[in-house]
Amino acid sequence: MLISIHRFNDNSQIMKSVSYLMVRLGIGISMLGHGLVRIPKLNAFSEGMINNFQSAPLPDFLLIPFSFALPFIEFLLGLLLIIGWQTKRAAIVGGFLMLALIAGTSLIENWSALPSQMIHLLFFILVYEFNQANAFALDSKKD
């Protein structure tokens, strides 16, 4: 159910909920954007990812499906976070996705990509950890 103003007892609750909303929307927009720009060029994205990972000790039977699924996962996670539905689950899946990307990035020694992935991981952790402030969302809880 969407937020009602009666849910808040004081200004600090409103501030926490607005802060949480900005964190949730920030990571949601980023993930949605990643998926949106990659889906129309899915084959080129997949080929580029596979080429980048040629030196990594990852088998093609894992890498190829992952490279095709990644943009759709990013898009779906972003959409869920923006609308605030299944927020905790999206944060968990997003966190584990970032861990997988961090592992892959480390395997190919692409150290310049790690800070961005670590920041995304931190945002997913914040969305999960402070979910009790998730008032402006489809899955916010009633009193």
Image (tube, rainbow, N blue to C red):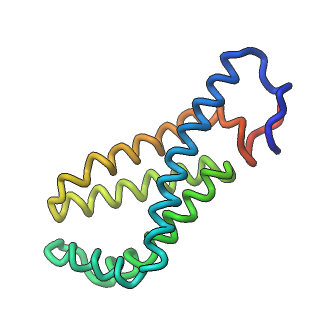
Q: Residue at x 39, y 84 (%)?
A: 43
Q: Is residue 115 above or below residue 53?
A: above
Identified at 49% across, 60% down, the residue is: 33
Q: Residue at x 57, y 37 (%)?
A: 22
Nearer-the-camera pick, 136 or 130: 136
Residue 95 is situated, as x and y percent measured from the top left of the image, at: 44, 51
Q: Is residue 6 left or right of residue 62?
A: right
Figure check: 3 above or below 105: above
Up-down: is 17 above or below 29?
Answer: above
Number of marks in picture: 0
Please tell me which residue lies in front, 15 or 102.
Answer: 15
Determine whether 138 is above or below 20 in the image.
below
Pinpoint residue 79: horizontal percent, then vertical percent. 61, 59
User: What is the quadrant of residue 8 in the picture?
Assistant: top right
Q: Residue placed at 58% from the left, 30% from the top?
A: 19
Left or right: 73 with respect to 111? right
